[in-house]
Image: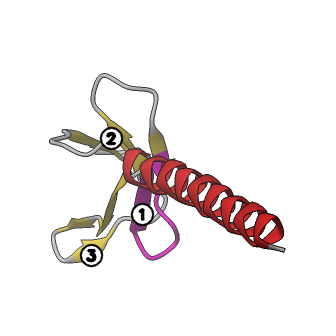
């Protein structure tokens, strides 16, 4: 009977170690996957500019504003970025 308890205790300890290992891996993946986001509204002379093009300088990341001039740039690396705004006629 003592053998059974020591075997069960060993399995519980092994199970806990495996769970802690996967919990650690999950935590590392969350921490390393942090991305930045930039939101804003494009204005000119007090009026919004609908459908203006927004781009991160020296990258291929870009979006278009919606009909209210609002935009969201997602999945950016954390840090400083230069935004380029272009609008037909400006």
Q: Determine which of the numbered discs, if any, sits on residue 47 in the image.
A: 3
Who's the residue at 71% across and 65% down the image? 6
Where on the picture, by quarter, is residue 80?
Answer: top left
**Earlier along the polypeptide chain: callout 1 or callout 2?**
1
Who's the residue at 42% across and 62% down the image? 72
In front of the other: label 1 or label 2? 2
Name the foreground residue: 13 vs 86: 13
Mark 3 and mark 1: span between their CA atoms? 15 Å
Vertical order, 58 against 79 (above or below): above
Where on the picture, by quarter, is residue 56?
Answer: top left
Quadrant of the snapshot with the C terminus: top left
Who's the residue at 52% across and 72% down the image? 67
Name the foreground residue: 25 vs 7: 7
Mark 1 and mark 2: span between their CA atoms? 17 Å
Mark 2 burial class by Cα count in 10 Å: few <14, some 14-19, many 20+ = few
Residue projecting furthest to the front = 1
| Spot occupied by residue 20 in the image (x, y as percentages of width and height) | 53, 59
Q: Secondary structure at mark 3?
A: strand
| Spot occupied by residue 78 in the image (x, y as percentages of width and height) | 25, 46
Q: Determine which of the numbered discs, if any, sits on residue 71 in the image.
A: 1
Asked if the stretch drawn in magenta spans residue 68, the answer is yes
Q: Secondary structure at mark 2?
A: loop
User: Which residue does the numbered mark 2 point to in the structure image?
Assistant: 77
Mark 2 and mark 3: span between their CA atoms? 31 Å
Asked if the stretch drawn in magenta spans residue 33, the answer is no
């Amino acid at each position: 009977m003592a053998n059974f308890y020591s075997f069960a205790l060993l399995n519980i300890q092994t199970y806990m170690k495996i769970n802690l290992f996967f919990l650690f891996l999950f935590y590392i993946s969350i921490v390393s996957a942090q991305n930045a986001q930039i939101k804003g509204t494009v204005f000119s002379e007090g009026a919004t500019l609908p459908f203006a093009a927004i781009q991160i300088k020296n990258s291929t990341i870009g979006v278009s504003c919606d009909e209210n001039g609002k935009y969201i740039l997602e999945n950016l690396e954390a840090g400083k970025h230069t935004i380029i705004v272009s609008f037909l006629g400006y």
